[in-house]
Image (cartoon, rainbow, N blue to C red):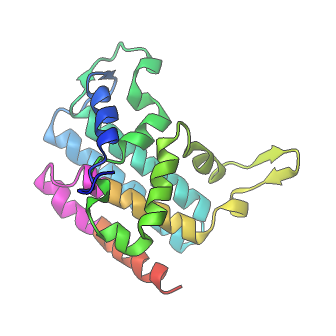
Amino acid sequence: MTNNNVDEKRVQEIEKNFSASTHFNISSDSDFNNSIDHIIGLLTDSFTLITNSSYGSALFLAITAMEETAKTHFAMFMKHDLNINNNKDPLMKHYKKHFLSVSPVFKMGSRLTNVLGNEKIDEFISLIDQKNGLMDLRNNSIYWHTDSNGNYFPKDSIDKNIAQEMLLFSIESFDDSLVGYSQYSIEASDCTDTIFESIKKDYHSK
């Protein structure tokens, strides 16, 4: 990370994906705005689940919103090819979408930093930058599993704090990656700004 908060390594990795092809295609204002509605719906549902103490499902939807943010963003620029093999399409891979959801200038703004702090943001980015690094958190938020020590359920590892932190992170990813490409996205983001401020107040009141 350089002094101007531009992640040059991330720039290089992201540039590689622009030369790839994808099944997905955003080629009209209508498709883009529908994608905005879809992602805001995921973020809103995640917030509703937090208010109902369903933290695992809330976290899962927050991560899903990050995936859909990356898919929408890169589908606007990558070559559209319905015949591409799935394993050659970056937007068919969860870990790739996690990585692509964080732009090289993600840390340039202060809104998220003022709530979570740099250390927590760097912790999430480090997790995202590992191949499948976010997958364990994603899967443990919605599925129960068994190991040699017994059974583990989402409630055993996912609490309100982590659900709120991931939703804040996901909202910032959405705002940083997509808001501004259309007037509609700017107006619609009032909804996610309101959610952000609501979580911020509750998070700081603990």
* Residue farthest to the bottom, as pictured: 205
Magenta residue span: 174-191
Query: Which residue is rendered at x = 45% and y = 20% of the image?
Result: 86
Residue 11, given in percent of the width and then of the height, sits at 28, 39
* Residue farthest to the front, as pictured: 3
Task: Please say if 25 is above or below 34.
Answer: above
In the rendered image, which quarter is residue 135 located in? Answer: top right
Does residue 181 belong to the magenta stretch? Answer: yes
* Residue farthest to the left, as pictured: 183
Task: Please say if 90 is above or below 165.
Answer: above
Residue 149, given in percent of the width and then of the height, sits at 88, 50
Residue toward you, 52 or 122: 122
Does residue 185 belong to the magenta stretch? Answer: yes
23 displayed left or right of 156: left
Total labels: the figure holds: 0
Residue toward you, 80 or 34: 80
Residue toward you, 1 or 117: 1
Residue 156, given in percent of the width and then of the height, sits at 73, 62
Residue 83, given in percent of the width and then of the height, sits at 35, 12
Query: Which residue is rendered at x = 56% and y = 72% of the image?
Result: 52
